[in-house]
Amino acid sequence: MEKLLEVKNLEVSFQTYGGTVKAVRGVSFDLHKGETLAIVGESGSGKSVTSQSIMKLIPMPPGRISGGQILLSGEDIVPKTEKQMEKIRGKEISMIFQDPMTSLNPTMRVGTQIMEVLIKHQNMSKTDAKNRAIELLRLVGIPMPEKRVNQYPHEFSGGMRQRAMIAIALAANPKLLIADEPTTALDVTIQAQILELMKDLQNKMDTSIIFITHDLGVVANVADRVAVMYAGQIVEMGTVDEIFYDPRHPYTWGLLASMPSLENDEKAELAAIPGTPPDLTDPPKGDAFAARNQYALAIDFEEEPPMFQISETHFAKTWLLHPDAPKVEPPEAVKKRMRQLSSTFEKPVVVKEGK
Amino acid sequence: MAEKLLEIKNLKQHFNVGRPNMVKAVDGITFDIYKGETLGLVGESGCGKSTTGRTIIRLYDATDGQVLFEGEDVHGKKSAKELKKFNRKMQMIFQDPYASLNPRMTVADIIAEGIDIHGLAKSKKERMERVYELLDTVGLNKEHANRYPHEFSGGQRQRIGIARALAVDPDFIIADEPISALDVSIQAQVVNLMKKLQREKGLTYLFIAHDLSMVKYISDRIGVMYFGKLVELAPAEDLYNNPMHPYTQSLLSAIPLPDPETERTRRRKSYDPAVHNYADNEKLEMREITPGHFVYCSEKEYNELKAKYAK
């Protein structure tokens, strides 16, 4: 499959009064055409900063891309100027934000907000753009688009606004769509509709999607591949089956075990991950997760673990995969979901270059 | 089952009464809450679940209906003294741990506010000891007492909110989406804390949320609300295994589960209120289909459901 996006060793930091916050610390991944990559992690793990860096939306200063490359169709966008980025934003890459209440302009008609993209990026005439806007609203499932196109955002419900956002994002047929928690503010029933809509549109337009969320249920629903982020780094990455049925990193175990399952009838205590994420002005030595990790080894506090490869597509950054590491049992709730996957290598392999 | 702590009878909360934009946020709901149980209340935003909670604790004055706490009506005329007594027994934990703590008060003052109002501490020393004890109960430590809310993370703030609610030794706590604003790994910590406190202090909870998997985990019984009405009320297990009202079925079918295989084969049901096809003269009310399992339905539906589920 063709690679659309390659992020190589990305580092992003912010200058604050408290010191430099290293929000993203060496993140690498790639994204194929038509694929959905979900990035999960808690607030402050760097998932939103990573995605905003791809669009170069982080405020600079205080933010700074201090290292690495972002290759979009083979071309590095890190050195690009603001003017050049304007041609890319909305056209090549577009974004759906978490809060549809604040990300639409309340003083502009919804139709005008869609037309703006079309007129700017596709040089359409006003009438053509308006017709296309109506078509797009119909595409995202808004009833009576001819009427809706002339309405203001406050006349739309939350779910409808998010649909309008998606229509704006897709107006110029972008190759890459970044969805930053697009359903978090919505009700489950509306969430299900929006997820179905996104999948449907992806099939039609062959867009790649980076989907940022902390809801593992949503991840299981939409993702082809999953990257788990912790303290500015990707700690585990694999196909959706590998992450849910054969997780290897203790943080991924923790996330999976802390969710109550619907089928589970027992009322045992939830396996919470103790403590809080580390302060990234001064990232801890060794493995950033060590202090909250019940499986932490002595070396975790000394040296940062390398990335191990478990299958063609599955990577995890934990010393537990080292041949000399003691064998550990994942928590009960995780053991229940473990399966033997055919693609797994016999032994984990250390990946030399920072993957 | 145990004795009733709270009886809610035909509670109505309408806003903008008499004007054309009147909203029937809560439209005649009836249920009981038993001592020591957790009752979960779920539904979409705007269905009236938060309004129900806020009306029960009298943050709003009810338009109609009764809330009986240990047999005593909460609404209606009350002297300041009576209200105070009542406020001690019922406390609330709010959704947004950022907005619900006064940013200009120290944690100690926030927690001790209830202690001061109700005169529960005789000396300064006793007051501080009580604060330390509460901080310890919710998993924070002494040093936190003199800090301000902005110095804490979301999960820690929610713990402060819980400590504040516990300060006056209440019997009943209304938790309005207490974990929605928190990260997954922190949600479990707060839920575990709430369960622990319930075991130790025999608390009764009304747990309002839209995250159904968490509600099922924490609740003994669950009520489902739709447009200001309670449409189904059942023991938690029973509701998940045998959802009877079509709205509950649609709600359950929409929850994404952390399992890729079930997600690939998911079939979502949608709810259309027209399926009921109620005639004008049909009387709609909560009817018990199987023991403890109530559904809001007409006589005709009742007979159908009864035939289908009660064997």
Image (tube, coloured by chain):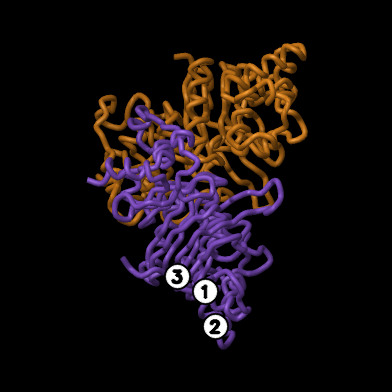
Identify the disc placed on residue B167.
Answer: 1
Left/right placement of residue B110 relative to residue A236 reads right
Residue B166, horizontal then vertical, whole percent: 49, 71
* Disc number lying in front (1 or 3): 1
Q: Name the residue under label 2.
A: B120
* Disc number lying in front (2 or 3): 2
Q: Name the residue under label 3.
A: B137
Write down which chain is painted orange.
A
Amino acid residing under circle 1 = Ala
Disc 2/disc 1 C-alpha distance (Å): 9 Å
Q: Mark 2 lies on which chain?
A: B
Instruction: Please determine whether, in this image, residue A67 is positioned above or below residue A172.
Output: below
Residue A233, horizontal then vertical, whole percent: 49, 39
Left/right placement of residue A116 relative to residue B143 reads right
Q: Mark 3 lies on which chain?
A: B
Amino acid residing under circle 3 = Thr
Answer whether labels 2 and 3 touch (C-beta < 8 Å): no
Question: Badge 3: few (under 14), some or many (20 or more) residues near its Cα, within 10 Å?
Answer: some
Quadrant location of the N terminus of chain B in the rendered image: bottom left
Rendered colour, chain B: purple
Looking at the image, which residue sits at the far front?
Answer: B281
Taking the spot 77% from the left edge, 34% from the top edge, the residue there is A107
Label 2 vs 3, first from the N-terminus: 2
Taking the spot 60% from the left edge, 76% from the top edge, the residue there is B78
Q: What element carries label 3?
A: helix
Instruction: Please determine whether, in this image, residue B301 is positioned above or below residue A151.
Output: below
Disc 2/disc 3 C-alpha distance (Å): 18 Å
Q: What element carries label 2?
A: loop
